[in-house]
Amino acid sequence: MAATGRTPGTISGNRGLQIEEPLIFEQGGVGRTGVDFEEPVRREDRLGGLAREGEIGLPGLSEPEVMRHFMRLSQKNFAIDAGFYPLGSCTMKHNPRLNERLARLPGLGDLHPMQPEATVQGALELIDSLARWLKLLTGMEAVALSPAAGAQGELCGMMCIRAALEAKGDARRRVLVPESAHGTNPATAAACGYEIDAVANNARGRVDLGAVKAKLNDDVAAIMLTNPNTCGLFEDEILEIARAVHEVGAYFYCDGANFNAIVGKVRPGDLGIDAMHLNLHKTFSTPHGGGGPGSGPVVLSGALAPFAPLPFVVHGEEGFRLVEHRGETEDEGQRAIGRLKGFHGQMGMFIRALAYMMSHGGDGLRQVAEDAVLNANYLLAGLEDVLTVSYPGHCMHEVLFDDGFLEDTGVSTLDFAKALIDEGFHPTTIYFPLVVRGAMLMEPTETESKAALDQFIATVRGLAAAAKSGDAAKFHDAPKLTPRRRLDETGAARHPVLRWRPAPDKAAG
């Protein structure tokens, strides 16, 4: 890392409790190790001449050095456990620690996916219970639990739609995708062999119903629509869209990434939806991203249920069992699309999600949605007079602003986001959705208090005032208080350094 990027002003390079930390490879030394091994027994070389000839290149460190290195790195990361994380679209919400404890219970935390079914009846019952909750909350006929993330859930849903059409001998070629959709939507449809036909938004930030109807014919396989959408708005013409799609024999796929805003309030099945994935981290509080792994169950209508992927749990006279191979009947997966991944899904996420549902109950989950929408509208009310609101009216679980308020200030959306870092906040989502210029998408989630939102509102208002006062330099140099300054993101993307190499003098030594 360039020296100009380091924290200045101290002899050590440290800044109080913020410790300067080199790369782990820069710290390694010969002969240092946290574990001693006995000399291995020499065996016959079976590598066919491919044996390593030099050192493996791993850094040598003692146990305290390893612990301190990763602890110091963790202190440089922003996390939901450290503060407010207003990242729009991603739903960075608190993960209740009760759920973590339950996921580690003996008999659940130490399961192996290849155990005999007789030894995991409780786990299969838990999976069945989770499936029942998800079907109840969505009003759908079936659920596939094995998809490993939302994007794979999309793939599962679209594969089920393709299988249903093929079963009828219907070779449709097009999928309608709103211009404001998550990028995975058109990518998923393309991966399934479909042509993408974009649908424009209207002036209210919603899918244009007239544009949808104009594109519908017997060559359209499905529409992929997010509701609430990526502009943080409810698609209030969704019933008419669903009717129009079904009238031409097509299917309705809903991106369920924003189910958090309507859980317990609206059942997607009642809206005419045929398939929808659910991100367990976004709605049901399982860990997000690297704290995962992810899980993207897919709920299916009665028309698509026979094509659900393997495996799935069934309950008979002898208890619970997994259907892992296509059988001779639909109940035994006769028309299943096959297997999407190894084993049975993310068991740890299933436990956490079910614990969240059972601890809240139906009324509690309804309040989750109400509080998420309330918090977003609280941000809207507190900022709409100083920021530029992209679309009029109330929002759902997230609020969308654009860079109109920064016009002629010399400050960009990126500059504004970087300045938030110096204030101790993770930046909002910026430049998404793409249909809004200079977008700033904020999602407070339901787990933030009024005090936390008030502090964020006051900070954003202060930054907006600074930008409008002509203090552009404050933003161009941000962040100033982090261990590293602003990076050249364009240069890093065009010329990434993907492998560490020692400095020439160290390599020579």
Image: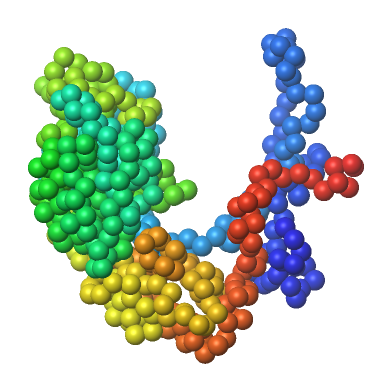
Expressed as whole percent of the image width and height from the top left, the position of residue 177 reads 29, 48
Name the quadrant containing residue 57. top right
Q: How many marks?
A: 0
- For image coordinates 26% across by 26% down, the residue present is 337
Instruction: Please indicate, yes or no, whether residue 283 appears anywhere in the rendered image.
Output: no
Rendered position, 440 above or below 502: below
Instruction: Please indicate, yes or no, whether residue 309 appears anywhere in the rendered image.
Output: yes
**Coloring scheme used:** rainbow
Q: Residue furthest bottom?
A: 469
Quadrant where the N terminus sits is bottom right
Name the quadrant containing residue 110. top left
Which of 358 and 163 lies nearest the eye of the viewer?
163
Expressed as whole percent of the image width and height from the top left, the position of residue 175 reads 27, 41
With 231 as the anchor, is 271 left or right in this view? left
Rendered position, 385 above or below 178: below
Which of 40 and 356 lies nearest the eye of the viewer?
356
- For image coordinates 63% across by 63% down, the residue present is 487
- For image coordinates 75% across by 67% down, the residue present is 4
Q: Residue furthest front?
A: 214
Quadrant where the C terminus sits is top right
With 292 as the anchor, is 171 left or right in this view? left
Expressed as whole percent of the image width and height from the top left, the position of residue 174 reads 27, 39
With 450 as the anchor, is 369 left or right in this view? left
Expressed as whole percent of the image width and height from the top left, the position of residue 477 reads 63, 75
Which of 105 and 370 lies nearest the eye of the viewer?
370
Name the quadrant containing residue 80. bottom left
- For image coordinates 11% across by 54% down, the residue present is 240
With 474 as the anchor, is 299 left or right in this view? left
Rendered position, 363 above or below 387: above
